[in-house]
Amino acid sequence: MLKDITLGQFFPGKTVIHRLDPRTKLVLLVVYIVALFLARSFVSYGLMLAFLVAVTFMGRIPFKSMTRGLKPMLIFILFTAALNLFYTQGGTLLLDWWIFHIYSEGLKMAFFMVLRIMMLICGTFLLTYTTSPIALTDALEHLLSPLKKLHVPVHELAMMMSIALRFIPTLIEETDKIMSAQKARGADFETGSLIRRAKALIPILVPLFVSAFRRADELATAMECRCYHGGEGRTRLKVLRYAPIDLAAFLAGFLLLAGVIVLRHFGL
Amino acid sequence: MSTIIRAENLNFSYPASGERLALPVFENLNIEIEEGSFTAIIGPNGCGKSTLAKHFNAVLLPSGGKVWVAGLDTEDEDQLLEIRRQIGMVFQNPDNQIVANVVEEDVAFAPENLGVPSAEIRLRVDEALRTVGMYEYREHAPHLLSGGQKQRIAIAGVLAMQPRCIVLDEPTAMLDPRGREEVISTVARLNREQGITVVLITHHMNEAVEADRVVVMHEGGILTDGSPREVFSKVKLLRQAGLDVPQTTELLYELRKAGWNVPIDALTPAECAEAIADALSPKR
């Protein structure tokens, strides 16, 4: 049952979007999010949506997996929509019943808010769908490297992230094994109240933590044996390099941002 | 032949912690490993095999005495990386020594740490993966491989440092018979074809038979040391130390006790069968 959990899912591929430098994609995501928060009319949202759909299409990402990713956020989206719908005032009064008052501005705000959240999530998914976790941590390490001057342990953070990613499947497998072992001894995880079920998790978490610490200890020794001594003087097998397509992608991204800003200026 | 690892009057004890007293492991242990040899170290649990192995690449430092690796003192901190580059280490649990989530990235880990240029890392990774027969798997995720394959990846990861010696600490303890065979034959081939010194710590007597020298450890000391034939002939001594002997030796030992005139030092099943056939043939 735990095998179904996928974190940072990645669809391998060889499309233009996949081949972009991960740093480019990270920066573009930031640009996209900024543009999304600046957009405030149908025209600019239309422009953003066209961009999103174009990139999804170029990355050959099935639309189904995009909508599937939105599902867990449904409650949050609905809640935000309701808040905006009932609490925004202005425009004509559309509905006036008991304590509920809906104005036309509220309807518009709610619609934009929902659109904004959904497009935000989809944009982030586009990054994780087309970029391997390793490339992503690599890109983060590169982009954050100026912070090294401020004594931020950038390399160590990136290393921790990639090791965490590496051990997710191992630890899930282990959890599965421990759960089976406890079930074999009569443990019950599926019935009872919420508190009862939460308590039933203790006999899983304790051995899991003990084993995770033991693994960490062994891994540290193994890393030392392979001459690991921090990020200093370290080289990489795969070096990140910007290509002409990255320049094109940057151009597209900044054109989008400029377009949204100009539209905003004209009150659109 | 020259000596690659030499321990002189090695003393070591695990430090006291809390209520536990300091636990002495070795007292004046001496051992030399010849360059290019294939040495197996066997012994019951808790005899200090793994502790000794960790002295060979300066993961542990002696409390007394000296360990020399390729002429370098393991206590010299400036030489630490060089010592660890020359002596590669493979551990028991393959899951806990694989760092990256792509095979080739993991093999590249050690040369990356050593600051080898990218183009050279590529060459070393490809060569190491071909050597252990895992080149086709270079873009796979390690957690989807079998135990034997993971352990071969770990060996490739060590090979990419271009070491002179590989120390394997019970590399087959968690593997099925097929994985065990994959790992041992890979190691034996590295020793034979590339002249890499191999120190194999193991529980399986059949694996020790493959070595050219067997060192038996018992209670922090060396019980006996010699070629597999010499060592495994001492059935009584090994049994007293709580160790098994290879099944072939055991069979011949029992036959001799029963009054048959068979040699004791036939190690492979084929040799053993021949010895028994000889003893049975009417010409004798």
Image (cartoon, grey):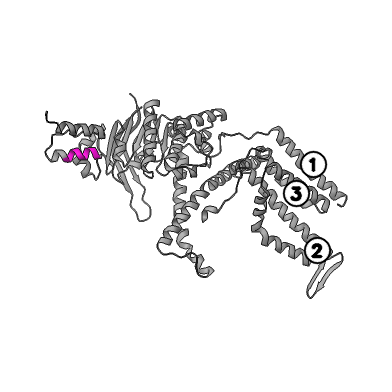
Type of amino acid at the residue the image marks with label 2: Gly
Which segment is the magenta one? B247-254
Q: Nearer the viewer, mark 1 or mark 3?
A: 1
Name the residue tied to disc 3: A34
Task: Give x and y (percent) for residue A140.
Answer: 63, 43
Task: Give x and y (percent) for residue B37.
Answer: 33, 29
Type of amino acid at the residue the image marks with label 3: Val
Q: Residue lying furthest front in this view?
A: B282
Q: Quadrant of residue B204?
A: top left
Q: Quadrant of residue A194?
A: bottom right
- Viewed as shown, does residue A15 lie left or right of B162? right
- Characterize the magenta stretch by its predominant secondary structure: helix
Above or below B248: residue A202: below
Residue in the image at 32% along x and 37% along y: B207
Q: Nearer the viewer, residue A46 or B90?
A: A46
Q: Which mark is residue A106?
A: 2
For marks 1 and 3, give the CA distance: 13 Å
| Residue B250 lies in the magenta-colored region | yes
Above or below B88: residue B176: below
Task: Give x and y (percent) for residue A134.
Answer: 58, 42
> Residues at marks 1 and 2, common chain?
yes
For marks 1 and 2, give the CA distance: 30 Å
Helix, strand or loop at mark 2:
helix
Q: Residues within 10 Å of mark 2 (few under 14, many from 20)?
A: many
Residue B171 in view, yes or no = no
Q: Residues within 10 Å of mark 1 (few under 14, many from 20)?
A: few
Residue in the image at 51% along x and 49% along y: A169
For marks 3 and 2, give the CA distance: 23 Å
Q: Which mark is residue A255?
A: 1
